[in-house]
Image (spheres, grey):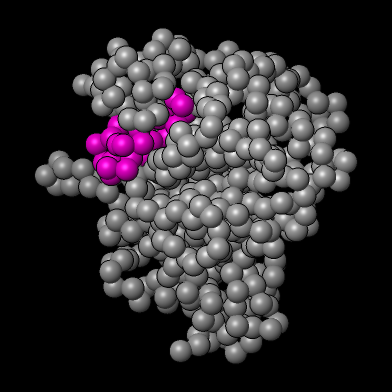
Amino acid sequence: MKSLRLLPSALLASLSAASPAQIVLDASSGKAAPTRTEDIGVGHFSEWSRATKKQFLVDWQAGKQSEWVFVMGNEAGDLDSMTSALTWAYHLEHSTQNTSNPSKAIALLQTQTDALDLRPENKLALKNSKMTSGHDDLLTMDELPEDPETLAMKLRGIVLVDHASPLRKWERAKILSIFDHHVDKDTAPDASPRVFEKVASCTSLVARQMFDEFYALPEEYHLPHELLELILSAISIDSGGLEQATQTDIDTAKRVFERSQWADKDLYEQMEAVDEVLSDAKKDLDDLSVRDLLRRDWKGDLVDTPSPRTPTVSLGFASIPYSLDEQIEKTGFGELFHWFAVHAAWTASINTDIDICLTKYKIRDENGKKKKIREIVLTVRDDVRIDKVQADALFKAVKRALESDKSLGLKKWHRVDELAPRQMVWEHQSGAGRKIIRPIVEDAVRKWDMKQGKVIE
């Protein structure tokens, strides 16, 4: 049993249940809506974040977008991505504030404000960092005052963290720097810093660079302990309390740890305890609806095809830690048709042509041992960019690509005979998640000739 006694009282206190949101009747819709009862964040980090957001919106109103750098992670918005963006934005601004070329930098979380709390570990970590409840001190996608495709061309530039290449909507922006711990996609070769390294947490790469530059400054700027402990939280949950850490993760954690409020603790014991608390929070998803599970960990973008008629399609991937059967039970009717109805409403709202849901769960085998099972749910719509004929053929192409990959070992789902056209569900035990499945699907789309209805060899 891992001990929680090493955690500071603030972290333990944050685990207590929050008081229920006050509910009022929204006169415009007749529906109940939560009131705005957030607590304003305290401490330098929250004050900086709130002031930065306000200044960006003021500058946008004044047409000064070109003065700003957006630091953005991936659209799944996990703790690593969010922390990396906040850390580098804070560093960019503070490290240049006494120079002749100061930076205005802000972290953009590429998710909706109301989706931030769909990751309980994020909510807990932000609360422990004394940020404003309701996330009014964070900039999210639904708060951008201008369409990203237009805004991208006006910005000073963007920095990618935990993300190897920008989403299509940001591709016209100048990429200033990249930090990622995945595969280098050769994006923006002239970006600087441009850091790709296999580590447990991208936050380790960002924090390492921050400290390298921080100690080289003629005068140190203030590093708030709330930011330092947020950094340690991200590294901890991604590395299993440093048990699965690389040497880079460990070395960076040590540098951050010695300046944090936890400095008088044992590094490994403290990181293990933090990981336990955050990991427990991460699993607390039972109250989420099917729609919330679909959008909680979703990544997607436009993918090019060889067809002049339909040069791009929208492709999305959701990762859900529940079996499809468990999700069906969460629907109002508890029926298969209702899960696909909820799924269809969600994908329609985000204009997705092809959606892949990746589920994972555990069962006990005949010997009582737990084994991991994964499922792949494939659907293709015909009401966004492609018509029925194209959708039928594209569904077949993606289905064939997945079934042809023998390493996946796909087996048909036990209720496959009940599925509608352009719906398919498999189960497998290969361990392949989004990082494996996504390239297979994207490659099938890129090679598929929309006009001829066939795959280009």
> Is residue 326 visible to the viewer in this orientation of the structure?
no
Against 167, residue 57 (above or below) is above
Is 335 in front, or is 373?
A: 373
Where's residue 197, x and y in %?
37, 53
Q: Residue at x 72, y 33 (%)?
A: 53
214 left or right, relative to 262: right
Tally of marks: 0
Name the quadrant containing residue 313. Answer: bottom right
Where's residue 436, x and y in %?
38, 62
Q: Residue at x 63, y 37 (%)?
A: 96
Q: Residue at x 65, y 62 (%)?
A: 171
Quadrant holding the N terminus? top left
Residue 251 is one of the magenta-drawn residues: yes
Where's residue 329, x and y in %?
46, 41
Q: Which region of the structure is painted magenta?
A: 228-253
> Is residue 149 visible to the viewer in this orientation of the structure?
yes
Against 312, residue 290 (above or below) is above
Against 391, residue 324 (above or below) is above
201 left or right, relative to 170: left
Residue 382 is one of the magenta-drawn residues: no
Q: Residue at x 77, y 54 (%)?
A: 154
